[in-house]
């Protein structure tokens, strides 16, 4: 089983460019989330989704958009990249709400110059 | 508000010594608690989880954690550390609607 797949693994963007980080899961999980990881900050929630067509903001949503048109996919869009968005991004999915283990992708390391 | 605190940013232990990493949480209901480990440049691997029942939970790689409701703690322990345990460790609590609230992490260094 592939689990949670993130692409790309590495990306360099120029300030102002846009891009989409892809996340796909093959476990038929309803819940999916995006986190960013910065040194000394742990992982912080950007956006999450509790099912197809339903998304909501997390702790640090500014500068990011998401949509959930299918159960499998949960892309994260940067409309106009800024150096402050240089980070490692992780996508996660889980089968239910609180009572389950989250499965993480391998991460996308994004650098904005 | 829900939160997780890992008081130790960086811990160094000698190989073969015991280890305890601290985690305190703030959560309104019965917490669902997790410990993840992250090696440099890698993703997160689940070490163990607590949902209910026995307050001492066993995980992979010889790790265990004890849930203490009275202290709002979920400390991670290992009786004898190996050099390969050097990594960053994250405590997390299961929030509502499928997301996790993470602590800021504890980096573990192991001395030969």
Image (cartoon, coloured by chain):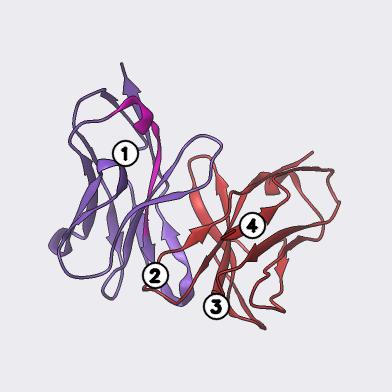
Chain colours: A red, B purple
**Marks 2 and 1, how far apart in space?**
27 Å
**Marks 4 and 3, how far apart in space?**
16 Å
* Lower sequence index among marks 2 and 3: 3
| SS for dot 3 | loop
What residue is drawn where x is 84% and y is 43%?
Answer: A14
Q: Chain of mark 3?
A: A
Q: Are marks 4 and 1 on the same chain?
A: no
- How crowded is the residue under tag 1: few (<14 C-alpha within 10 Å), some, or many (20+)? some
Residue holding disc 2: A100
What residue is drawn where x is 43% and y is 75%?
Answer: B96
| Image depth: mark 3 or mark 1 in front | 3
- How crowded is the residue under tag 4: few (<14 C-alpha within 10 Å), some, or many (20+)? many
**Marks 4 and 1, how far apart in space?**
32 Å
**Marks 2 and 4, how far apart in space?**
19 Å
Q: Are marks 2 and 3 on the same chain?
A: yes
The numbered dot on residue A30 is 3
The numbered dot on residue A5 is 4
Q: Which residues are magenta?
A: B82-92
Q: Going by the picture, which residue comes out furthest to the top? A: B112
């Amino acid at each position: 089983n592939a689990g949670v797949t993130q692409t790309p693994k590495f990306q360099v963007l120029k300030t102002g460019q846009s891009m989409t980080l892809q996340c796909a899961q093959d476990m038929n999980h309803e819940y999916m989330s995006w986190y960013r990881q910065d040194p000394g900050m742990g992982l912080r929630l950007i956006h999450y989704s509790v099912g197809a067509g339903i998304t909501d903001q997390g702790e640090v949503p500014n500068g990011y958009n998401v949509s959930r048109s299918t159960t499998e996919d949960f892309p994260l869009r940067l409309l106009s990249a800024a150096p402050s968005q240089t980070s490692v991004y992780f996508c996660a999915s889980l089968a239910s709400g609180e009572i389950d283990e989250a499965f993480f992708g391998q991460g996308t390391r994004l650098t904005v110059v | 508000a829900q939160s997780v605190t890992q008081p130790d940013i960086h811990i160094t232990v000698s190989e073969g010594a015991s280890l305890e990493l601290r985690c305190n949480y703030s959560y309104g209901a019965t917490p669902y608690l997790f410990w993840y480990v992250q090696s440099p440049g890698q993703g997160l691997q689940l070490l163990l989880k607590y949902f209910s029942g026995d307050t001492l939970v066993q995980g992979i790689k010889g790790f265990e954690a004890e849930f203490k409701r009275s202290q709002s703690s979920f400390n991670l322990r290992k009786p004898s550390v190996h050099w390969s345990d050097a990594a960053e460790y994250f405590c997390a609590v299961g929030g509502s609607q499928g997301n996790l609230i993470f602590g800021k992490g504890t980096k573990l260094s192991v001395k030969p």
